[in-house]
Image (cartoon, rainbow, N blue to C red):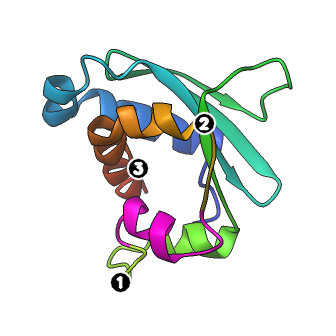
Amino acid sequence: MTDAFSEAWLKRFEERLNADPEMRVIGDWFTTAFSLASGDKRCIVRFERGRLVEAIVSPRLDVRCAFGFRASPEIWARFFQKDPEPLYHDFFAMLMRVPGFVLEGDTLVAMQNARALHRAMNIMRTVE
């Protein structure tokens, strides 16, 4: 998945996530921003009430986010496979069992939003 976290990819993610009926139901309290990092690529996605409202590619240092996920391009590629192998099928499994998949920042905020975050990450896996 060479174009993960690019502007075009983030736009497709935004469209898919904002059209998701499940996210509309569970996302009412999901207002936060988090980063996604792969090698030297980094972006920040900002949510308001379960909707992805802003995606920033290569953010400057003054763009704030509560937490973030960091992994090598190889780990992200395994996560984005159409039929991922065990442990790479779910970001919670990766957090617990894949040493190179790291949750950074305010982990409490991430876990307070676990249900909506889980849905967002599952939708992310479907973006082509």
Between disc 2 and disc 1, whose residue precedes? Answer: 2
Say left or right for 105 vs 39.
Answer: left
Secondary element under disc 2, as helix, strand or loop, is strand
Q: Which residue is mark 2?
A: 67
Is residue 8 depicted above or below 53 in this figure?
Answer: below
Q: CA distance from mark 3 to mark 2?
A: 17 Å
Secondary element under disc 3, as helix, strand or loop, is helix
The residue under label 1 is which amino acid type?
Answer: Pro
Residue at 70% x, 68% y: name it. Answer: 72
Query: Could you say where residue 23 lies in the image, as x and y percent from the top left?
Result: 22, 31
Q: Residue furthest front?
A: 108
Q: Are marks 2 and 1 in contact (CB under 8 Å)?
A: no
Q: Which residue is mark 3?
A: 124
- The magenta span reads 89-101
Query: Could you say where residue 66 lies in the image, as x and y percent from the top left?
Result: 60, 28
Residue at 14% x, 35% y: name it. Answer: 22
The residue under label 3 is which amino acid type?
Answer: Met
Q: Which residue is mark 1?
A: 86
Say left or right for 115 vs 91.
Answer: left
Residue at 36% x, 65% y: name it. Answer: 90
Between disc 3 and disc 1, whose residue precedes? Answer: 1
Closer to the observer: label 2 or label 1? 2
Query: Could you say where residue 28 lies in the image, as x and y percent from the top left?
Result: 24, 17
Closer to the observer: label 3 or label 1? 1
**Displayed quadrant of residue 92:** bottom left
Is residue 84 depicted above or below 17 in this figure?
Answer: below
Is residue 73 depicted above or below 20 in this figure?
Answer: below
Residue at 85% x, 25% y: name it. Answer: 60
